[in-house]
Image (cartoon, rainbow, N blue to C red):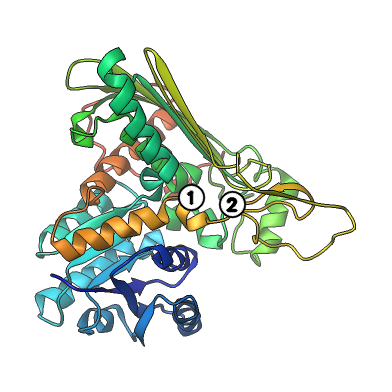
Amino acid sequence: MAGRLGIGFVGAGFMNRFHAQSLVGVRDCDVTGVYSPTRAHAESLAGMAREIGVAGDVHLASSVGDLVANPEVDALWVATTNDTRIAVIEEIVDALKRGKGELAGIACEKPLARNLREAKRMVELIESVPVLHGYLENQVFEPAIVRGKEIIWRRAVPIAGRPYLARAAEEHSGPHMPWFWDGVRQGGGVLNDMLCHSYEAARFLLASPDEPRDALRVEEVNAQIASLKWTRREYAELLSERYGGAVDYKRAPAEDFARASVKLRAPGGETMLVEATTSWSFVGPALRLRAELLGPEYSMQVDSLNTDLSVFLSRRVQGPEGEDLVEKQNAEQGLMPVIADEPGVYGYTNENRHMVQAFLSGQMPSENWYDGLAVTEVLMACYRSAEEGRTVTFPMDLTDFVPAVAQGTWKG
């Protein structure tokens, strides 16, 4: 297709608001539809899209099928709760098969699913219709990571050889909404929520620009999970109070810390390692994203809190809590880092530019649901390793494995 891409948002929460903000830096697209089961949320997102100048004639849909049927909607960005993901895609696919509408592509927010069986079902559904698919993994589109990889692979690798170790970490003080804290609805805790980012960013750095990411074969996974902060009595009570009793970490906790080591084999036989760490128990200025790539004669580092802008506010400058300086902000005073363009720095702008261009040109995005499936398989291997207290080896069948956290039986 050619011209402009009309984007329909399925879900009007935190993630699709970030996606909408990023569209300020993306050409040839407009927000033309929004669906949310909560009408006020849909109205709010549509209003924001109009205010920042990324909206066309925004249709507030009465259902997902209604969004598909809108001729002004060419592609969908799906960012609903993890427990509803399959039902949403089933509704979209059913509408397409019944000829209710046409779509060029569907972009789905990470993680693709709560477990491997669900991820396989997602892929089965998307393969049943002639629609392109993109996996919304923003960290592989971070400008610093993309630029760092380009330099390393262009200047260092041809002389010194391919890299052998990638480290990635995402850490903050906890999610925004109560469903994220619910192991059953979310599919786990911080490992499922955020190690999907860290593993895929590390895998992206280790893969040559000329080879598909699945050319890196997973051999071993060793992982550990723990609830370090939020099962302590005072913090469990704080969570319960904050969410009106909807989150009960005394009864059904999820992990707030996870680490994983993944051994991979390159096509040439070289051994490579991914070290990933994620946390909902990090107390610092705000969300912190870090990445490193190490090779025989080189290294690169990225840290999102090493910003080019900071502000100092004395103790006399007092005001309400907020996130006006940086996502997951933990303080309003002192020397604070500021990220001037969060959608850009975090990769959302590049990510959505790539998805829009791919859907308009009829090309499969470089980050698609097959990548989401591969990431889900590694996440399930991490949970199994953590539960069994041992290194697990590939190949292995994890189709029927559901983590104890996701079953609501894990006790921390």
How far across and down, in percent of the image, does residue 97 sit?
10, 74
Front one among 287 and 343: 343
Task: Residue type at mark 1: give it.
Answer: Val
Q: Quadrant of the N terminus?
A: bottom left
Q: Is residue 341 left or right of residue 160?
A: right
Q: Are marks 1 and 2 in contact (CB under 8 Å)?
A: yes
> Which secondary structure, mark 1?
helix
Name the residue carrying label 2: 339
Q: Residue at x 44, y 80 (%)?
A: 46
Q: Quadrant of residue 266?
A: top left
Task: Residue type at mark 2: give it.
Answer: Ile
Spot the residue most to the right: 316
Q: Quadrant of the C terminus?
A: top right
Q: Is residue 253 left or right of residue 195?
A: right
Front one among 270 and 186: 270
Q: Is residue 180 left or right of residue 373?
A: right
Q: Quadrant of residue 90?
A: bottom left
Residue 84, visible in the rendered structure = yes
Front one among 29 and 70: 29
Name the residue carrying label 1: 345
How far across and down, in percent of the image, does residue 367 sit?
26, 48
